[in-house]
Amino acid sequence: MFKKILIANRGEIALRVIRTAREQGIATVAVYSERDKMALHTRLAEEAVALGGNLPSESYLDMDKIIDAAKRTGAEAIHPGYGFLAENAVFAQRVKDAGMAWVGPPAAAITSMGDKIVSRQIMQAANVPMVPGMTEPAADVEEALAAATEMGFPVMLKAAAGGGGKGIRIVLEPADLPSAFKTASGEALAGFGDGRMYVERYLVNTRHIEIQVMFDQHGNGVHFGERECSIQRRHQKLVEECPSPVITEAMRAEMGAAALRAGAAVNYEGAGTVEFLWADGEFFFLEMNTRLQVEHPVTEMCTGVDLVWEQLRVAAGQPLGYEQDAIALHGHSIEVRLNAEDPANGFLPSTGRIDNLRIPGGPWVRFDGGIYRNMDVGLDYDPMLAKLIVWAPDRAQAIERMRRSLEELNIGGVKTGAPAALRVMLDPGFRAGEFHTQYLEQMDLTEPESELDLVVAAAAAVHRFRASRRASLAPRDGERLGWMARSRVSKSSHPHIAGGTAGFARGEAGA
């Protein structure tokens, strides 16, 4: 195992990696921009190296500076987190060429899955269900229009090299396609340096379901079940949960097998996420994210497995050491992304100084964040400030725990998406598990007349819920203890997973 690693990232994901490394006796090196010199990740790591500058291009995206920092500090591996250089095949190869381990998949896998056209071709060959659409980029608007007309409207224009919701447009009518093509292509060119577009059939009222996979360097692969990521706006997720309320055991096995075929087709190594669209009992490949996902904590909460530790073990060349039947989902977990944005004003960015900070607590509540009082929030970096994660024996209790936690939360000085997430927790459709990827877009997220209105609404909902569930709460608490004791992953068969589950059972809600 590595003695020292460098984390080429910032904020909550840098802290997330540092904490697992420290638990395992691995020294960490943080890197930071001028703006981040007082950030928490620089203070928690054993060493911190200044990259200079404020903009990402001057710091966290500067490959030369990061590799030089790793060499100078004697780091044996680089963990990229997510965002910045995490899915940059050139950087992955440069790290290896510099004699260090890359905590991620091979550069070739990143390249294959990063190009949406190439990945579609590979998935078709691997017999992974696909959304009907083009397998080559459109040469021009006319070719895109012809393809869209043949498959039928509505359609989705997608950037071949896209990601993060950029370079995507839904087109309902033929007359709207030319302008949408121009706009999306320009956005893709600016964001990815590649303006190529292709057309897919747009499936209405779908759900966004993803499968977490892990492959070692010895040809072994497993999946850790699914995450429900349908509560999103403009392809940006707000609420994620594990498991999905609509996925059966049989469907989970089928989707998991397809996800493993997808990873095997590109000789994958490490953690990855295969994303699917799901509708009426059918699923279709969307894309594969060749990194750890923001929403990985909900999988950790339901499996008791530290996915960052698994990443480090795999990167160090260790075999997984367990089979698919050692992994089971227990209870229900929900995550809310806390972005610096104003949901009552179209989710526009919010800036300022965090002048107050109250973090929720209590059993089975986890807060992954790199924020602190008097921290300035600007526009230089991703707007995500933190993530709030809860676990409970079942989905209804998890919703109530998240509702309570959101009410306790206070991030003063900047607006966040917390009020929108609270509206979701109180929404009857969400509580019933009846929603889709356009659900959040259709909700009224304007601010109530006063903060008191929101509190009263929440209290009323809680009273109704508790009245209907009071008699059944105690048995479910006992059931919670039961699954911990009955965990199929034993210390004798796999010590590091068993240890993680034991810590989880004791209520050590690490970030």
Image (cartoon, rainbow, N blue to C red):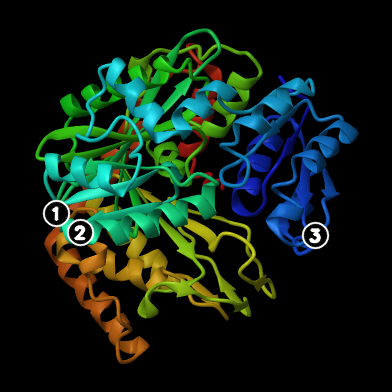
Left or right: 141 with respect to 219? Answer: left
Query: What residue is rendered at 40% in x and 67% in y?
Result: 406
Callout 3 crowding tier (Cα within 10 Å): few <14, some 14–19, many ≥20: some
Callouts 1 and 2 close, C-beta under 8 Å: yes
Circle 3 residue: 53
Choose the circle earlier in sequence order: 3 or 2. Answer: 3
Circle 3 sits in a helix, a strand or a loop, which is it? loop
Q: CA distance from mark 1 to mark 2?
A: 6 Å
* Image height of 379 relative to 11, above or below: below
Residue situated furthest top in the rendering: 218
Circle 2 residue: 430
Q: CA distance from mark 3 to mark 1?
A: 47 Å
In the image shown, does 301 or 183 lie closer to the viewer? 183
Residue situated furthest right in the rendering: 72
- The amino acid at mark 2 is Phe
Circle 2 sits in a helix, a strand or a loop, which is it? helix
Left or right: 18 with respect to 104? Answer: right
Choose the circle earlier in sequence order: 3 or 1. Answer: 3
Callout 2 crowding tier (Cα within 10 Å): few <14, some 14–19, many ≥20: some
Circle 1 residue: 434
Callouts 3 and 2 close, C-beta under 8 Å: no
- The amino acid at mark 3 is Gly
Q: Which quadrant of the view contains residue 246?
A: top left
* Image height of 113 relative to 172, above or below: above
Locate the N terminus and report the quarter of the image it occupies: top right
Q: Give the mark toward the camera: 3 or 2.
A: 3
In the image shown, does 348 or 414 lie closer to the viewer? 348
Callout 1 crowding tier (Cα within 10 Å): few <14, some 14–19, many ≥20: few
Q: Position of residue 237 (x, y in %)?
A: 37, 55
